[in-house]
Image (spheres, rainbow, N blue to C red):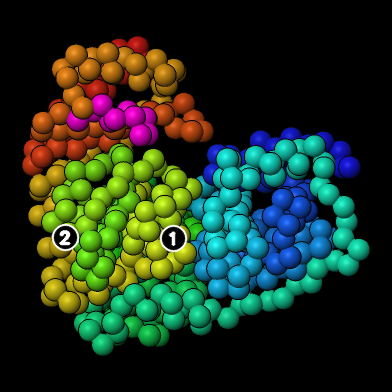
Amino acid sequence: MTAPIKTHCFKAYDIRGQVPSDLSEDVAYRIGRTMVVELQAKNIVLGRDMRLESPMLADAMTRGLLEGGANVIDIGLCGTEEVYFATSAFKADGGVMITASHNPKGYNGMKLVKSESRPISGDTGLNAIRDRVESGDLGVLADIPGQVRFELEKTAYIEHLLSYINLADLKPLKILADPGNGAAGPVLQQLIKKLPFEWVVINAEPDGNFPNGVPNPLLPENRALTRNALLEHGCDLAIAWDGDFDRCFFFDQDGRFIEGYYVVGLLAEMLLKKSPGSRIIHDPRLTWNTIDQVRLAGGVSVQCKTGHAFIKERMRLENAIYGGEMSAHHYFRDFAYCDSGMIPWLLVTALMSESSKNLAQLVDERIVAYPCSGEINYRVNDVAAALDEVLKHYLPQGPRLDKTDGVSLEFSEWRFNLRGSNTEPLLRLNVESKGDPELVASKVKEIEGLLNSRYME
């Protein structure tokens, strides 16, 4: 039995915190030892991103896994989806990705999966691991420690990515790619060799010092570098990634950022052409466009609570071909039901080639049909009370109420979803309408007024 420690870094879906105050070498070692016990693991895949602390945490994790008796399949510097792929491909008992994704410098974390790349979240084993780590109940040291095997070759993964498209049909698009000094650069370079596109690549080198800012294109203030480079070089589109590249983001030829919501509908329609009648999973934040596109493409849309653990579980249950969240997480049945930041842009560029349409032409009709606010975050002093205040105002108007995730209220011409953050005193708002952007803007203002009256900090 080892001495108890604090485990503030354990969250609902992953492990994340500042290094070393929240996430230290000792915590990483203990997680390794505990994973062996909880998963009865013989083989664990281990990958890491480019953050400065990641090699140190990987070393500590490796020591814990080996001393617990598991073998480590070390895939080195990579993206989260590479751990998902390797865990399934090597038929390992679990996998660990050391990353803090888009968090600020000085943070790090871990994403854990079990066999078949199934996520380990609070109710599927993460809390049990946390309790053991905290108490020091790490199990017994193995009589024969495990061994490390390095699997740094990416060929099988690259070939799998390319299996989603027909290379012969691709046209010579000019693409601006911005890995943001995250982990996407090395994979992108391998794909570039296989694709007939003209490339302009910026911020390609993985660098945990983040010389061009933390890679998180979801924040509007982080998009200027990508947009300006696209316009300067006259590219057909731009693609940018977050740090561990489990999300990718699109800009059209005019530098306009394309909300992930419209990419969900686009990918669903494309995949349904190959598998008519299939099920598509989507989150509740913005829904009307996805439901409409899936219906028109002959598929079945299924709503699911936001979050990768929920989406992946529901996809398996429904045998869904694809799942999409407006936050730019895209999940694929043939990718172990996991999210990928590489498959979406390969599909989009294939669709641009096939249709001879630019990205704007592929999404403009849908943006006009279902304009949205994008996600707006409000810092409030009481999440539950603020939510009640909004409901008290709108429920007498007789909307359709849905509580899949937070609250969604649906009126004849507009709808909104409002939900509290799992980790911060924030309310997250999404509003959409049927063809009326002015209505979206006015309803955002109306809801802000309700929150401003008493609850906004």
Q: Secondary structure at mark 1?
A: loop
In the image, residue 412 sits, relative to residue 37, either above or below, namely above
Q: Going 16% across and 60% down the picture, which residue do you hit?
A: 297
Percent from the top left, x then y, of residue 63? 80, 61
Q: Which residue is mark 1?
A: 337
For the question of whether residue 176 can be seen, the reply is: no
Percent from the top left, x then y, of residue 304? 36, 43
Amino acid carrying label 2: it is Ala
* Cα distance between the residues tagged 2 and 1: 21 Å
Left or right relative to 276: residue 49 = right
Q: Going 10% across and 33% down the picture, which residue do you hit?
A: 413
Q: Which residue is mark 2?
A: 297
Percent from the top left, x then y, of residue 368? 10, 48
Q: Going 12% across and 63% down the picture, which residue do you hit?
A: 361
Left or right relative to 134: residue 268 = left
Frontmost residue, 174 versus 130:
130
Left or right relative to 38: residue 182 = left
Report the magenta residues as a range: 401-410
